Image: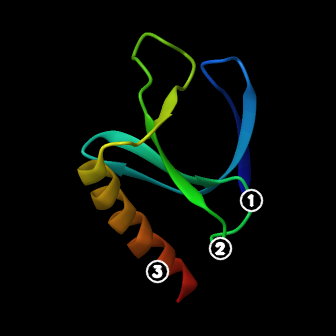
């Protein structure tokens, strides 16, 4: 499982394990956790990188509708892998 390090707006480094990734309507999303387990608390990050930047930029999905729809997709992906 891949572990990525992110830099917060306060220049603090945080690490997350990438549990799953998907693309919805041309936007990349990551399902991440601070632990290497689906049993831990998980977060959904949205790729907000600009075309001009070589660095990836992610932010937490906060919109409830977007969060619900992307969560359902991740739930299906994870369920398919466990079978």
At a point 65% along the width and 73% down the height, the residue shown is 39
Label 1 sits on residue: 35
Q: Quadrant of residue 22?
A: bottom left
Residue 42 position in % (x across, y down)? 57, 59
- Quarter of the rendering occupied by the N terminus: bottom right
Whether label 2 touches label 1, CB < 8 Å: yes
Label 2 sits on residue: 39
Viewer-nearest of labels 2 and 3?
A: 2
Along the polypeptide, which appears first: circle 2 or circle 3? Answer: 2
Provide the secondary structure element on which disc 3 rests.
helix
Residue 41 position in % (x across, y down)? 61, 62
Label 3 sits on residue: 80
In whole angstroms, how far apart are the C-alphas of marks 2 and 1? 9 Å
In whole angstroms, how far apart are the C-alphas of marks 3 and 1? 21 Å
In the image, is 75 to the left or to the right of 25?
right
Residue 68 position in % (x across, y down)? 31, 59
Q: Quadrant of residue 15?
A: top right
In the image, is 4 to the left or to the right of 21?
right
| 52 is higher (above) or lower (below) than 63 | above
In whole angstroms, how far apart are the C-alphas of marks 2 and 3? 16 Å
């Amino acid at each position: 499982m891949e572990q990525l390090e992110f830099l917060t707006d306060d220049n603090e480094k945080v690490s997350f394990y990438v549990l799953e990734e998907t693309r919805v309507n041309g936007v990349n999303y990551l399902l991440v956790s601070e632990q290497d387990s689906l049993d831990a608390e998980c977060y959904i990050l949205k790729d907000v990188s600009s075309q001009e930047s070589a660095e990836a930029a992610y932010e937490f999905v906060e919109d409830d509708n977007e969060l619900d729809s992307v969560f359902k997709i991740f739930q299906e992906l994870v369920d398919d892998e466990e079978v």
